[in-house]
Image (spheres, helix red, strand yellow):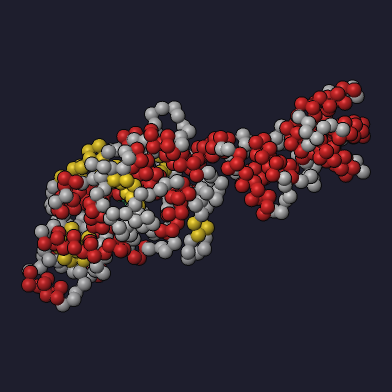
């Protein structure tokens, strides 16, 4: 059977990075098996619906190169792919279950349910569960005589439809990551399948759609593992046992310290993003930062996420999307949670910046220079990027670490100046600058070194004694790209000009 998988997010807010990982694993699995990757929007819960969330999901996935074969944007043979547009389909299916006795009408009001819960609370440690043990005590089409509940329906009394979970049965299924899972049916409640407004719940819509859309593998977060037994029952009750998809429940993303589920609060505390792209809360206007806006490259983010819970079984760490497709297997997804380590994400970013062609990095620097109205020559941009490539973690550092390449420093490291810029040294530096001015415009870094050394030695000094001072006069600071390379990029004219004007300023 051709592999068909789906990513089925609910548009209830920004997609957490764990959700992005789920999408990525589905995508990799589909590509690996030359199958189909679908996106289905599970928006049946109207109370939790957030209008901007769907767009956010698509923008995030498209930034990362996780492309759907079928979905709300590009359609497909099982359209529509938005559950709110499939309402009638679920109704038809849920009534089939009612007819076969695997589902029933329940008329309990909120107050009645509350009452039942309270009674349980006061009578012992058990929590109330609507199920085989309590069903008879409630108001539903199992406990009431037919004449009575039919009258309620024709009288327009609101009802929900619940799953009729059998008493004391073992439900078994295989999870591709966890192996065989066995759950006693008494631990599962009679889940609501259709709400009183006629909308299906997640459980019903999810199973019906996975069946109709011919999904072969359900790869989703561990938080859905407790729902899987109820889903297995639904497959059985519908008579779809034969085509029930395989399940794979992915491990949780854990806090950086390693215990407990990673939360938005952890991200705020640790100052790192856990959303793919910036999210603006529609109510508060508050912005949660994304990987994209924090300067992570999409390919680094994908590589980082892929290894968060999956290991290739080799020492290889750097994977392009194609290599991931090649190497990925569900069997190598870890059972235990994956510790979120932002340092690792930074490491990947560094690696990808190092290997990216200059042309794809240029825009990061150009954009910032333009924003700040700093004049620049395109030729210098490329040299600066080449010089900084191995030193930066984020593209923005191409700007913050290169300011002195584009404008003369206004301030100087005064510690160095006070300690080293003696009157004697100032006149030697003047000698150096006139030597540099006489150099060829295209001088190589070796020429600068030679000239500086010659002047220093002539004056009975070590060449090294001038280097830090020259760096401060030319760039303002004591750190940065290799000094000789810096001088080469600036060129003799500009270097001489900078040394002279700094000396003028500092020796008055
Ligand atoms: N709509 C569910 C979610 O938001 C999908 C769970 C599943 O994949 O079955 O995660």
Tell me if residue 127 comes above or below residue 255 in the rendering.
Answer: below
Residue 121 in picture, x, y percent from top left: 24, 59
Q: Image check: 458 left or right of 476?
A: right
Q: Nearer the viewer, residue 111 or 434?
A: 434
Which residue is drawn at the image coordinates 17% and 66% (left, top)? 106
> Residue 484's spot in the image, x, y percent?
75, 31
Q: Is residue 267 above or below residue 79?
A: above
Q: Nearer the viewer, residue 122 or 171?
A: 171
Q: Please state, as top left, top right, bottom left or bottom right, where the N terminus lies in the image.
A: top left
Q: Residue at x 68, y 42 (%)?
A: 381
Location of the C terminus by quadrant is top right
Of 210 and 341, nearer the camera is 210
User: Residue at 20% of width from left, 48% of height from top?
Assistant: 232
Across and down, in percent, residue 436 comes to 85, 32
Q: Is residue 187 visible?
A: no
Residue 401, image x, y percentages: 68, 42
Count how many numbered circles sit on residues in the image: 0
Name the residue furthest bottom. Answer: 155
**Does residue 79 appear in the picture of this structure?**
yes
Judged left or right of residue 424, residue 131 is left
**Residue 146, quarter of the rendered image:** bottom left
């Amino acid at each position: 059977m051709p592999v068909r998988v789906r990513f089925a997010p609910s548009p209830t807010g920004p997609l957490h990075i764990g959700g992005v990982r789920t999408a990525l694993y589905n995508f990799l699995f589909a590509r690996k098996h030359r199958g189909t990757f679908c996106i289905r929007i599970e928006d049946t819960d109207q109370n939790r619906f957030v209008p901007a969330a769907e767009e956010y999901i698509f923008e995030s996935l498209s930034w990362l190169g996780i492309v759907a074969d079928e979905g709300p944007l590009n359609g497909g043979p099982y359209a529509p792919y938005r559950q709110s547009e499939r309402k009638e389909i679920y109704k038809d299916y849920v009534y089939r279950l009612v007819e076969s006795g695997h589902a029933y009408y329940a008329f309990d009001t909120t107050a009645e349910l509350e009452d039942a819960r309270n009674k349980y609370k006061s009578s012992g440690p058990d929590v109330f569960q609507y199920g085989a043990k309590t069903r008879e005590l409630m108001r539903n089409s199992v406990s009431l005589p037919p004449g009575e509940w039919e009258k309620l329906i024709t009288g327009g009394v609101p009802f929900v439809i619940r799953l009729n979970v059998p008493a004391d049965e073992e439900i078994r299924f295989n999870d591709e990551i966890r192996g065989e899972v066995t759950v006693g049916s008494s631990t599962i409640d009679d889940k609501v399948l259709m709400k009183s407004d006629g909308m299906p719940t997640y459980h019903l819509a999810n199973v019906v759609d996975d069946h109709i859309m011919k999904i072969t593998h359900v790869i989703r977060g561990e938080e859905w593992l407790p729902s899987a037994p109820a889903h297995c029952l639904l497959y059985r009750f519908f008579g779809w046992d034969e085509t029930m998809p395989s399940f794979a429940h992915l491990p949780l993303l854990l806090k950086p310290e390693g215990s407990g589920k990673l939360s938005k609060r952890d991200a705020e505390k640790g100052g790192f993003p856990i959303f793919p792209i910036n999210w603006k809360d529609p109510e508060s206007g508050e912005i949660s930062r994304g990987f994209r806006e924090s300067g992570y490259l999409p390919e680094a983010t994908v590589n980082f996420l892929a290894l968060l819970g999956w290991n290739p079984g080799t020492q290889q760490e750097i994977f392009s999307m194609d290599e991931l497709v090649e190497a990925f297997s569900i069997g190598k997804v870890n059972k235990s949670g994956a510790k979120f380590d932002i340092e690792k994400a930074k490491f990947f970013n560094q690696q990808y910046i190092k290997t990216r062609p200059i042309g794809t990095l240029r825009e990061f620097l150009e954009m910032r220079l333009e924003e700040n109205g700093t004049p620049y020559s395109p030729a210098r941009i490329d040299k600066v990027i080449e010089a900084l490539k191995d030193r930066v973690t984020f593209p923005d550092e191409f700007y913050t670490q290169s300011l002195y390449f584009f404008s003369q420093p206004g301030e100087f490291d005064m510690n160095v100046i006070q300690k080293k810029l003696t009157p004697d040294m100032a006149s030697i530096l003047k000698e150096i600058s006139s030597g540099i001015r006489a150099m060829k415009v295209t001088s190589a870094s070796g020429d600068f070194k030679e000239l500086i050394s010659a002047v220093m030695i002539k004056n009975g000094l070590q060449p090294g004694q001038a280097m830090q001072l020259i760096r401060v006069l030319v760039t303002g600071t004591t750190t940065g790209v290799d000094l000789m390379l810096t001088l080469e990029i600036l060129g003799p004219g500009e270097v001489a000009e900078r040394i002279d004007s700094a000396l003028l300023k500092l020796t008055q």
